Amino acid sequence: MWQTLSGAQELLVSQKFVDIVCVILAAIGMHVVYLIFNALVLRFVFSMPIEEAVAVWVIGSQKSAPVAVTAITYITKDIATQGLLSMPCILGQLAQVFIGAAMAPWVAKIVVKVQNARKVAAVDEENDSGDVAQNGASGDLHSSTDLDGAEAGTISKREAGGTAGGETVR
């Protein structure tokens, strides 16, 4: 890859700065479009755990500069033209790295939130199944709201020996 660029040094140096900036912005724009599209597809089409979805989202949105440079070598045999055509691929790859680095803390917070919500849901489910198992035989159902604010027709955690306000009630 770098040999391709160094073979086109004169041609690359002669490019206008504005053209290089446009190439970088186009690469960033393309990467952002891929990120948005893949996020929508993963959100509304596929259902997978958040950890796997993030991996598919990020990796599926990236383009590979080495593969692009290899493909460019089949387009033309002129080293200078190969280097010029490789420049957008390499700058795009670099932009992807910086975008990924900026997104990582934000995505990590989302993953941690989802994982914490799963843990809370699992504990609540475990507590609810334990409450039903403890009160299943007695069948104590409330017809109105109890002291814990439970709705009608539910079993109170207080009666089930569960927790109320962080303490175990006996």
Image (cartoon, helix red, strand yellow):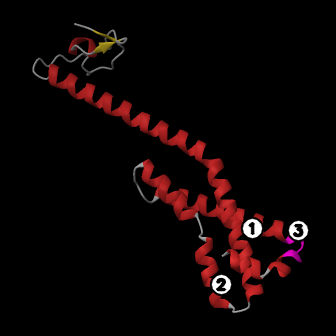
Amino acid type, callout 2: Ile
Q: Which mark is residue 127?
A: none
Label 3 – label 2 distance at C-alpha: 23 Å
Q: Earlier in the sequence, mark 3 or mark 2?
A: 3
Work out how far the residue at label 2 is from the one at label 1, CA to CA, in angstroms. Answer: 18 Å
Q: In which image quadrant can residue 107 be found? A: top right
Residue 152 in percent (x, y) is at 30, 20
**Residue 18, label in figure:** 3
For label 2, count other residues whose C-alpha is less than 10 Å away and answer few (under 14), some (14-19) or many (20+): some
In the displayed image of the protein, which residue is found farthest to the bottom? 77
Nearest to N terminus: mark 3 or mark 1: 3
Answer few, some or many: residues within 10 Å of disc 3's Cα (few below 14, many 20 plus, some between 14 and 19): few
Front in this rendered view, residue 155 or 79: 79
Residue displayed at 72% across by 84% down: 82
The quarter of the displayed image where residue 11 is located: bottom right
Residue identifier under label 1 = 26
Q: Which residue is mark 2?
A: 72
On screen, residue 112 versus residue 149, left or right, reads right
Seen from the viewer's position, the closer of residues 103 and 98 is: 98
Magenta region, residue range: 13-19
In the rendered structure, the answer to whether residue 34 lies left or right of residue 157 reads right
- Is 36 drawn above or below residue 158 in the view shown? below
Amino acid type of the residue tagged 3 in the rendering = Val
- In the picture shown, does residue 114 fall above or below 48? above
Question: At which x and y percent is residue 140?
Answer: 17, 16
The residue located at (69%, 74%) in the rendering is 2
Q: Earlier in the sequence, mark 2 or mark 1?
A: 1
